[in-house]
Image (cartoon, grey):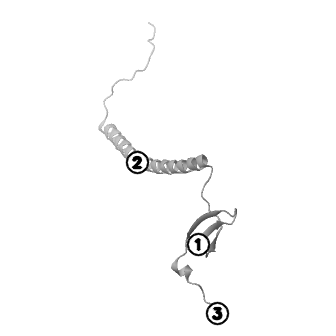
Amino acid sequence: MAKDKIKTMDLPVRLTPDQQRQRGLELADCHGAMRVLEEEQKSTKGRWKKQSEEIEVNMARLSRIVQKGEECRPVAVSESENWAEKTVEIIREDTGEQVHYRAMSEHELQQQIPGT
């Protein structure tokens, strides 16, 4: 008689108490790993949200700059007193353009007496 060909199949096998306990420990480890992963996800979501908000703010700022073709930067200015009109003119040092003027304060209107 010819020998039958032997195959393998996945079939239910009753676990021993030790094997069942081992699978329980593995399950507990999986639960713990899932909790750690969920906490990392929350932390990552928070970082992602903060970083994306910062990038969006920067993009909006840069969009305004590109659209206007200008941005605010520190520029050297000087104040020039106009005694006839009792004003102080703010002049850009780089272009000589008057960028602002204001009325003189009471303190500024007080003239210094020579020698004091």
| Depth check, front residue: 45 or 86 | 86
- C-alpha distance separating marks 2 and 1: 64 Å
Question: Disc 1 designates what residue?
Answer: 85
**Mark sitting earlier along the chain (2/3):** 2
How packed is label 1: few (under 14 Cα within 10 Å), some, or many (20 or more)? few
Q: Position of residue 38 (x, y in %)?
A: 39, 45
How packed is label 3: few (under 14 Cα within 10 Å), some, or many (20 or more)? few
Dot 3: what SS? loop
Question: Disc 2 designates what residue?
Answer: 42
> How many marks overall?
3
Q: Which mark is residue 93?
A: none
Dot 2: what SS? helix
* Quadrant position of residue 76: bottom right
Dot 1: what SS? loop
How packed is label 2: few (under 14 Cα within 10 Å), some, or many (20 or more)? few
Vertical order, 104 against 96 (above or below): below
Q: Position of residue 26 (x, y in %)?
A: 37, 41
Q: Nearer the viewer, mark 1 or mark 3?
A: 1
Vertical order, 76 against 110 (above or below): above
Disc 3 residue type (three-letter): Gly
* Quadrant position of residue 13: top left
Disc 2 residue type (three-letter): Lys
Q: Nearer the viewer, mark 2 or mark 1?
A: 1
Vertical order, 17 against 87 (above or below): above
- C-alpha distance separating marks 1 and 3: 26 Å
Question: Disc 3 designates what residue?
Answer: 115
| Depth check, front residue: 77 or 32 | 77
Q: Position of residue 7 (x, y in %)?
A: 44, 18
Q: Would residue 104 appear left or right of 1 to someone viewing this image?
A: right
